[in-house]
């Protein structure tokens, strides 16, 4: 089958905040830069700014409100993950795209989608896993920073890296300025990776 004959890759995009990477992916789809389409944008935060952006672009949206799963002992992660999986499966995506989704997903959830669960992390993995990467890069005196797109495994920020983008750390940078430079690069990097998956030139089969 030629790339031209392929059906568009169906994407479920998960967000928690402003959804800038989701917008970049949606624009790449709409402009036919990549052979993909977003079938659902899902957020765990009902007031996430990215939800309104998605609606303005005519994209279906769903909310799986994290607070609905709060118990006296804390968040019932198993119940949250089960409902999130149900909503994802309703949309029947080919690829689940984490785009600023600020939840650590349980191993059973990850195994359910392993090989078709993608994330972007704001560092040059394996360096600087976790949060506050921009300030940590500055504190360490690094000269280079960037972002990594990787398939998700049960290990936090530990799945196979498929592509990275790099930016310089400039004199006078603070965390906000550095984050903005990384974000602009991410808006090209993430659609590029999804485009490669859509054309069949990139895949990962878990062992």
Image: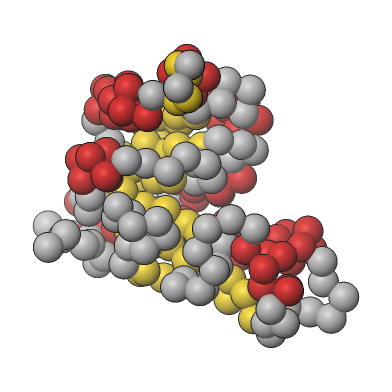
Q: Where is residue 20 in the image (x, y as percent from the top left)?
A: 61, 45
Say which residue appears at 69% left-offset and 78% top-offset: 140
Q: Is residue 81 left or right of residue 55?
A: left
Say which residue appears at 27% left-offset and 44% top-offset: 107
Question: Where is 98 relative to 139, above or below?
Answer: above
Q: What is the image's colouring? A: secondary structure
Q: Position of residue 153 (x, y in %)?
A: 29, 55
Rendering quarter of residue 91:
top left
Q: Where is residue 86 in the image (x, y as percent from the top left)?
A: 27, 23
Q: Which of 67 and 85 is in front in this view?
A: 67
Q: Nearer the viewer, residue 172 or 36?
A: 172
Q: Where is residue 169 in the image (x, y as percent from the top left)?
A: 73, 78
Residue 24 visible: yes
Give the farthest residue toward the front: 73
Question: Where is 32 relative to 159, above or below?
Answer: above
Where is the C terminus found, in terms of image quarters?
bottom left
Q: Is residue 179 left or right of residue 186?
A: right
Say which residue appears at 55% left-offset and 35% top-offset: 16
Q: Nearer the viewer, residue 195 or 45?
A: 45
Where is the N terminus found, in terms of image quarters?
bottom left
Rendering quarter of residue 123:
bottom right
In this rendering, the count of numbered labels is 0
Rendering quarter of residue 41:
top left
Say which residue appears at 45% left-offset and 22% top-offset: 73
Residue 8 visible: no
């Amino acid at each position: 089958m030629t790339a031209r004959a392929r059906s568009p890759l169906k994407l479920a995009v998960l967000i928690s905040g402003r959804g800038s990477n989701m917008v970049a992916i949606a624009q790449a789809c709409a402009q036919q830069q990549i052979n993909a389409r977003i079938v659902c944008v899902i957020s765990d935060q009902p007031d996430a700014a990215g939800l309104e952006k998605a609606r303005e672009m005519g994209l279906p949206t769903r909310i799986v409100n994290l607070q609905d799963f709060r118990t006296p002992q804390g968040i019932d992660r198993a119940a949250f993950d089960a409902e999130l999986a149900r909503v994802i499966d309703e949309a029947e995506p080919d690829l689940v795209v984490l785009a600023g989704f600020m939840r650590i997903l349980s191993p059973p959830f990850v195994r359910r989608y392993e090989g078709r669960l993608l994330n972007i992390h704001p560092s040059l993995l394996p360096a600087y896993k976790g949060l506050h990467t921009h300030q940590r890069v500055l504190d360490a005196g690094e000269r280079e920073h960037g972002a990594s797109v990787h398939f998700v495994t049960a290990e936090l920020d530990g799945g196979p890296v498929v592509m990275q983008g790099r930016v310089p750390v400039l004199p006078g940078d603070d965390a906000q300025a550095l984050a903005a430079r990384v974000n602009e690069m991410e808006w090209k990097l993430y659609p590029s990776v999804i485009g490669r998956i859509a054309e069949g030139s990139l895949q990962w089969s878990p062992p």
